[in-house]
Image (cartoon, helix red, strand yellow):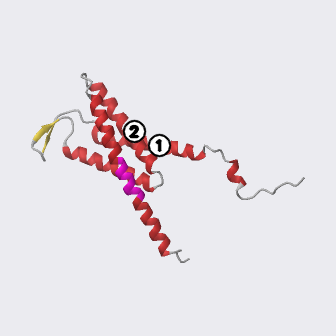
Amino acid sequence: MAFEQPGPDDADRRRPASHPRRRSAAVFVVAALLGALVWGAWLGRDHEASYDVVTGTTQYPYVTLQVLGCALTVGVVVALLAAWRHPLVGAGGVGAGFLVAWTVEAGTSDDSGLYLVGALLLAVGLALGTAVAAGVGAGAAALVRAARRRRGPRPA
């Protein structure tokens, strides 16, 4: 009876099959925390009416520039996660974290139940926006990798 010598690929077979899934789950959790953090930093503390200098109106609870800054921050976070290797997981995590944080806050302050409509609209907007940001991040990362391959190895 002949025994096979272990090859370089045998080490990969001993790793649990769930290893990539665990990493994706960890990225999702971190992304969800980042999404909730972005919501909290930009929108979570604002509970008063504000005068919007752009539109010349009083807005409650958020002003236009505040929401724009929040949206841009979400986009940058998702693009960075996508460039780091996890476009869909990062986009889904950031969107889920942001949505849960917003929905919990809206649900505790709304007696009419219309926050559910807002949550649905926010979910659609987050899905579209984070998908675009993930595409931009993944595309930028692919361009950087292609440029590095063309440039060749760095001299020692």
Q: Amino acid at mark 1?
A: Phe
Residue at 44% across, 48% down: 88
- Magenta segment range? 130-138
Question: Residue 137 location, x and y as percent?
Answer: 39, 56
The one nearer the camera, 18 or 46, is 18
Residue at 72% across, 54% down: 10
Question: Residue 7 location, x and y as percent?
Answer: 75, 58
Label 1 sits on residue: 28
User: In the picture, residue 4 is in which quadrant?
Assistant: bottom right
Say left or right for 128 vs 148. Answer: left
The one nearer the camera, 103 or 135, is 135
Question: Residue 84 location, x and y as percent?
Answer: 46, 55
Q: CA distance from mark 2 to mark 1?
A: 9 Å
Residue 140 vertical position relative to residue 99 in the rendered view, above or below: below
In magenta segment, residue 137: yes
Kindly state the secondary structure of the residue where label 2 is placed: helix
Residue 41 vertical position relative to residue 5 in the rendered view, above or below: above
Kindly state the secondary structure of the residue where label 1 is placed: helix
Most extreme residue toward the front, as rendered? 1
Q: Which mark is residue 96?
A: 2
The one nearer the camera, 105 or 90, is 90
Q: Which mark is residue 10?
A: none
Q: Residues within 10 Å of mark 2 (few under 14, many from 20)?
A: many
Question: Residue 81 location, x and y as percent?
Answer: 43, 51
Residue at 43% across, 44% down: 31
Magenta stretch, main secondary structure class: helix
Looking at the image, is mark 2 or mark 1 earlier in the sequence? 1
**Do the CB atoms of the residues marked 2 and 1 lie less than 8 Å apart?**
yes
Residue at 47% across, 43% down: 28
Most extreme residue toward the bottom, as rendered? 155
